[in-house]
Image (spheres, rainbow, N blue to C red):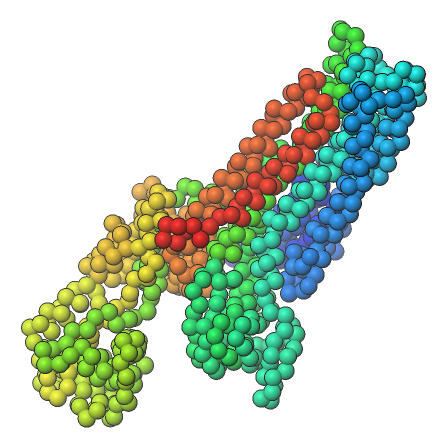
Amino acid sequence: MQTITQPDDSDSPTPTTPVALAIGGMTCASCAMRIEKKLNKLDGVTATVNYATEQAKVHVPDGVTVDQLIEAVASAGYTATPPAPPSSPSAPGASDETGAVDETAPLRTRLVVSAALAVPVIVLAMIPALQFDGWQWLSLTLTAPVVTWGALPFHRAAWVNARHAAATMDTLISVGVTAAFGWSLYALFWGTAGEIGMTHGFSWTAERGAGDSQVYLEVAAGVTVFILAGRYFEARAKRRSGAALRALLELGAKDVAVLRDGEEVRVPIDELAVDDHFVVRPGEKIATDGVVAEGTSAIDASLLTGESVPVEVAPGDTVAGATVNAGGRIVVRATRVGADTALAQIARLVEDAQTGKAAVQRLADRVSAVFVPVVIALAFATLGFWLTAATTGNATAAFTAGVAVLIIACPCALGLATPTALMVGTGRGAQLGILIKGPEVLESTKKVDTIVLDKTGTVTTGRMALVAVTPAASTTEAEVLRIAGSLEDASEHPIAQAIAAGARDRDITLTTPENFANREGLGVEGIVDGHAVVAGRERLLADWSQHLSDDLRATKDTAEADGRTAVLIGWDGEARGVLVVSDTVKDTSPEAIRQLKALGLRPVLLTGDNERAARAVADQVGIDEVIAEVLPADKLDVVRRLQDEGRVVAMAGDGVNDAAALAQADLGLAMGTGTDVAIEASDITLVRGDLRAAADAIRLARKTLATIKGNLFWAFAYNVAALPLAAAGLLNPMLAGAAMAFSSVFVVTNSLRLRRFRALVDGAHR
């Protein structure tokens, strides 16, 4: 969690600038760790390298340039380039012309050609009935291009790593494939396998154990194909895991109709400037964030917020870029463009979350850093053990076991376990209007047992609304609404506007009052349709000798006891009615509370209202615990007190006065309808402004964390189980290659299941 502290100039950290780098040439988690170490050796630099996203997030102090960072990466044997801005067509993940696609196409070609050559080699080796005189030489002819050209990416990476005195997954593959091919060449040219194959044929099952003359061409070819297949499907799956972010970046409009001297001029989106006025027709995307200047319409923001119901807008209302105009023609004044828009900020938050590392991933990184050297040592130990065993035929057994150990090891799965799940989970969250700031947030969601809900703007709408009208015996509700609404419509006060809006919502036609006057702190006066009308406090009516009946007084007292505002109205010398105005509970809040309880959370309502008013809202939504009459400055203390009681606290709020409490809580959730300060202080932002999104956010975060831990378990379990089998000589090297490739693909495809996560609406999946 973030904490709010007073800056100490005497011990302030050195200011740093964040820099993002796109990394090329990585093939496993060990590569990422090497690059990370190289970057962190630079003075004052803090770097995190993500294998799945192929990006480095670097914080650099003054004096360290991007060129120095690129040089450091190059010195480790890899490439680094600053990524293009999100608005650029060449931005990472922004189009199909990205690195992921460029990498997949040649990889697919290499895989198809290698497989076409390798399949006959494997079939001939494993089916004795198909073997003919000299079949080994045909196998050699087919295998040679697979081992040289097909496995070239592994050999090249292994050579680069060797030049830098390092070893990675490619080292294991290259050594294993080369050893199998080299052994086979020796057996064919200098051993007895060539003679046997030329004169008598060769049975894979009958001859494989006969001394040191056996060939392993099918192992060299098969392992290469299996590893290439694993890399190809892994690259495709990684591409799919980032699909949500790419879709988010592609939401924005590409051009816009700007008003220049009263004429519409269509220009590229990059030429749009703040304060420009642009036209949005029905069905078009809104080009950038702005304020409606002319016209009314309904805006479909589902692609950005996950909220499916269009929102009505009129002059003065704000709109966000990438949302769709579902109604009439509007003119919008641009207020934010480029990297400052809501869409760009959302994309930046998601990218930051995806490039971070959870605590559980750091353990996997430490293991991956030493894994390859340990495996190489284990392979030599296995070879030595079998060579010195007492029985005959140990050279073949030793070679088989040693190569199997090299091939079966798979740090790739460890490196992919966390970032792929994080990519898919945060991307899916962005589609649903849930922005998770970083991987460390996931751990917090698992432990939370209490959620503190700020009342105004979180559980309630935060806007005043007319909730009840009680007329006197001498009039009707419609008449009270017509006269009160007409008078209050001339006032800018939120309570007055709530009454006027409430009258219109009930299809009441309002008229313009005459001689309107505002009585500061008391109410308003005026003439409506020939009636002298006063509306406001009881004291104002008393000034006009208008007194409440027993029924009207009872209504007023009950409303005020419940924390609501009672507006009294009278005309022609008589008190005529009571209008009750209140901040209303959101329609979705009761369902949200049920969902939070189902997750094992204990909801607490926090408000500055009196106990009775707070309890009325709590009863409406199903909250048992209420903390009322809390000053804004005391919200932080409430969170601390709950934590001191041993609770793990989540806090949901939307105002400036919620920021400190959001930062103090173990998990802060900011409503996207709230202030920038609250959003900045939180861990999760709920763009939809719907409290049900809080339950969805916790469910998604927990599901993502569970997926990460599941991935890590299987990645560790795979190696723990497979390495002893390989060392014991119980695993054929070709099968080991297939299993190694499958382990990486399994981890990525398991993470892709998060794409099916659905938000809950009224207890059903959406």
Report how many numbered discs are placed on residues in the image. Answer: 0
Looking at the image, which residue is at 28% across and 78% down?
Answer: 507
Percent x, y for residue 147?
Answer: 83, 34
Is residue 454 found left or right of 542 in the rendered image? Answer: right
405, above or below 15, in the image: above
Looking at the image, which residue is at 58% across and 28% down?
Answer: 717
In this view of the protein, which residue sits in the foreground, 755 or 363? Answer: 755
Is residue 679 found left or right of 551 in the rendered image? Answer: right
Looking at the image, which residue is at 41% across and 61% down?
Answer: 689
Q: Quadrant of residue 263?
A: bottom right
Percent x, y for residue 341?
Answer: 55, 67
101, above or below 582, in the image: above
Q: Is residue 435 visible?
A: no
Q: Quadrant of residue 385?
A: top right
In this view of the protein, which residue sits in the foreground, 630 or 546? Answer: 546
Percent x, y for residue 645?
Answer: 31, 42
In this view of the protein, which residue sits in the foreground, 174 or 650? Answer: 174
Is residue 538 found left or right of 704 in the rendered image? Answer: left
215, above or below 281, in the image: above
Which residue sits furthest front? Answer: 129
Percent x, y for residue 112?
Answer: 77, 41
Q: Is residue 429 visible?
A: yes
Q: Quadrant of residue 399?
A: top right
Is residue 602 found left or right of 613 in the rendered image? Answer: right
Which residue sits furthest top? Answer: 390
Looking at the image, which residue is at 54% across and 60% down?
Answer: 346
